[in-house]
Image: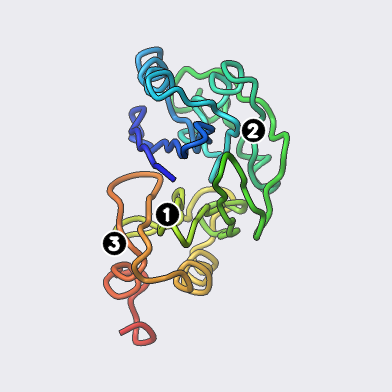
Amino acid sequence: MQLKRFTFSPFEVNTYILYDKSKECIIIDPACNNKQEQDYLLNFIKENRLKPVKLLNTHCHLDHIFGNKFIADTFNLETEAHKEEENNINNALNAAHLYGIQMKEPYPIKKYINENDLIKFGFSELKTLHVPGHTAGSLVFYNIEDNFAIVGDVLFKSSIGRTDLPGGNYETLISQIKTKLFNLPEKMNVYPGHGPETNIGFEKHHNPFLNDEKYT
């Protein structure tokens, strides 16, 4: 499995395309919110002769779904996310107006993803964890053999996702990271929704929000 990361919008969101030798690909958190960013993503897909087959959201805060409608319309895809993200996706347009940002209203979630669901495409598959705390329906997509996890805004390098927005809860997020993400291999690469990649071991032992006597 190959991974391509793009960073889009003033919020500097990481959008990911995953693909394999079959040329099927999935798009996670399309954040492209202007024509230049849309064209950049499309050119990568065309140049690599990829066929998008799934549109996934780790969560549905507006910055992670700027490009949802564009991707859905361009490739005839439906939004897939956790059911608990319905409020976020339904309120995204109002949130954009509050920020003074133009965006097209995203489509509703058409397929719900739950913990332990398998996301299959081409010759590949991802496993799913439900890790609430940043939002009620935050998801993590991971693959043990290919040694990576796409974690949205659950975990960052030396930090964690904010918990002061609707659906967020600090104690829940800390508990969920420790009981779910920290059960993944320490060497596993972590690709967050913003900022640089990291790995489970580094965060387990050095993240100031998560480092305690249990992991030292």
Identify the residue position indicated by label 3 in the image: 158
Q: Residues within 10 Å of mark 2 (few under 14, many from 20)?
A: many
Name the secondary structure under disc 2: strand
Name the secondary structure under disc 1: loop
The answer to whether marks 3 and 1 mark residues whose Cβ atoms lie closer than 8 Å is no
Q: How is the image coloured?
A: rainbow
Point out residue 180 in the picture as x, y percentages from the top left corner: 53, 69
Q: Residues within 10 Å of mark 3 (few under 14, many from 20)?
A: some
Mark 3 vs 2, N-terminal side: 2
- Report how far apart the C-alphas of labels 3 and 1 lie in the structure: 11 Å
Amino acid type at image mark 1:
Gly
Q: Is residue 145 above or below residue 35?
A: below
Mark carried by residue 128:
none
- Report how far apart the C-alphas of labels 3 and 2 lie in the structure: 30 Å
In the image, what residue occupies the spot 53% across and 26% down? 51
- Report how far apart the C-alphas of labels 2 and 1 lie in the structure: 23 Å
Q: Is residue 50 above or below residue 208?
A: above
Compare residues 147 and 161 and report the one nearer the observer.
Answer: 147
Point out residue 66 in the picture as x, y percentages from the top left corner: 49, 26
Identify the residue position indicated by label 1 in the image: 161
Name the secondary structure under disc 3: loop
In the image, what residue occupies the spot 39% across and 49% down? 192
Mark 2 vs 1, N-terminal side: 2
Nearest to the eye among marks 2 and 1: give it: 2
In the image, what residue occupies the spot 61% across and 53% down? 136
Query: Quadrant of the image for the N terminus?
Result: top left
Amino acid type at image mark 3:
Ser
Please indicate whether residue 184 sits to the left or right of residue 132 in the image.
Answer: left
Say which quarter of the image contains residue 52: top right
Amino acid type at image mark 2:
Thr
Query: Quadrant of the image for the C terminus?
Result: bottom left
Identify the residue position indicated by label 2 in the image: 79
